Amino acid sequence: MIRLVYFGTVIFLSTVHLFQILPLKELEVSKILKNLPLNIAQNKLQIIPSRKDFEQAKLDLAKLIEKSRVGRDLTLIAGTVRLAFHDCVGEEHCDGCIEYTNPDNAGLDKIVQPIDNLYNNGYKGKMSRADFYALAAVVALTRSTADVKDKYQGLKNFKVGRKDCSTSPNENKPTILPKGSSGYKETFNYFKNEFGFNVKDTVALLGAHTLGRCYSKNSGYQGVWDNDIFNKLGSNPTKLASTSVLDNSYYDMFIKIVPWIQVDLKSGKKQWQEIFFPTPNDQISNTSKQHPILLNSDLVLSWEIEPKDKSGTSSCLLHPFITCKHSAGHKYAAEFAMNNALWLKAFTDVFNRMIEKNPYKLKAASTLK
Ligand code: HEM
């Protein structure tokens, strides 16, 4: 045992020494790292991928996202964007680690599975898992605007060099995620404390909920945020569904359509649905017949809602009378609802800052050799 520890220490120290005395190219460093024991390669040193591996990873991830097609949805678009957010929460921020025992991460295991397979079989040692997760989301966001006028351009500013946590891909330190039942103060405070984001940043970032949906079995909420009625592409059968298209339709939901009411779900939680469709989605088995939803934490972008109890019962009403006051986020949400290009620019900027939240110095992927 003592000999093993001694041997490990010698390897580690001589590797560090090697890096100090030899002006190694990044490609060579990445080759050496590939052959090192996992704990050294993954955790002690920053892995900068070669240009070739980085470009190949983009192509492989794009193919994987395309393969996730279910009808008009590419489910990995929304899935990887949620994964990137959840990976960037917690003490070490974007660190290739998810706390799977946390109920707020429910469902992420299914999303991560094909991404981890690809990573483990082709990219381990060539780039960090944290870089791979962030890249997956950015490749997904690029695909999500392929059919619309305003394109997501975040990929060209992508940076690499995030380090993984020592237990990657599993996180064993508790992470605190925001709650759908949370009100105005808690939601905005969360993003201020976790990422240093101001009100405008937070309003812009939550536009990510234009993608994907809630599943009862994961979160206790059920339904999509915006459906094809809000989709700028309509329900064109040859194009992606609203749940896979990144646009500002999410903001239309609480700016243009006000009569939302809270409905009770079997999970004991509450979600907002339009007054015209008050049957809770979890009582409608055909998902295509379910209606758009908002959570408290979405509506607070426009309204000063505070929960009165644990299930999130709202302190004010939006129907039959509006007793809620507009929140500080409202003016930004209203601007974003009117101008897709303006929102996309703000979203791209804040999303990049979120996935760059990392204690280490990152390197622009555009400069890779
Ligand atoms: C107040 C903050 C937030 C709350 C309370 C929240 C809550 C939720 C909940 C409850 C779900 C449904 C999970 C399920 O049932 O499977 C969800 C999904 C999702 N969230 Fe958030 N979220 C927040 C912020 C964010 C942020 C900052 C992003 C990304 C930048 C994001 C991206 C997504 C995406 C894309 C989905 C859909 C996933 C899919 O369809 O697979 N969320 N969120």
Image (cartoon, helix red, strand yellow):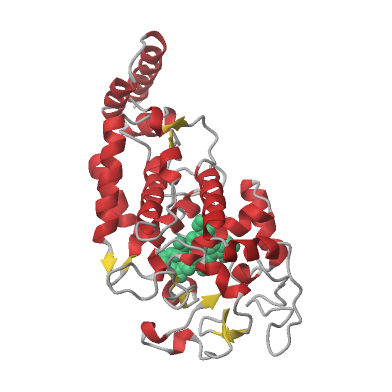
> How far across and down, in percent of the image, does residue 280 sit?
51, 87
Q: Nearer the viewer, residue 70 or 259?
A: 259
Q: Above or below — where is 142 with respect to 263?
A: above
Q: Nearer the viewer, residue 258 or 65?
A: 258
What is the x, y in percent for residue 344?
51, 54
Task: Please report the residue visible at 27 percent of the width from the left and 62 percent of the height from the top.
Answer: 68
Quarter of the view holding residue 91: top right
Q: Is residue 89 visible?
A: no
Query: Who's the residue at 24% across and 60% down the image?
Result: 67
Label count reads: 0
Query: Seen from this angle, which residue lies furthest top?
Result: 21
Asked if residue 159 shows in the view, the reply is yes
Determine whether 190 is above or below 165 in the image.
below
Quadrant of the image for the N terminus?
top left
Q: Position of residue 209 (x, y in %)?
A: 50, 65
Above or below for 362 versus 284? above
Would residue 353 be found to the left or right of residue 105 on screen? right
The quadrant where residue 167 appears:
top left
Task: Give residue 304's quadrant in the image.
Answer: bottom right
Task: Estimate the x, y position of residue 121 in percent, counting from the top left.
Answer: 23, 43
Q: Which image quadrant: the C terminus?
A: top left
- Between 129 and 352, the one lying in front of the other is 352
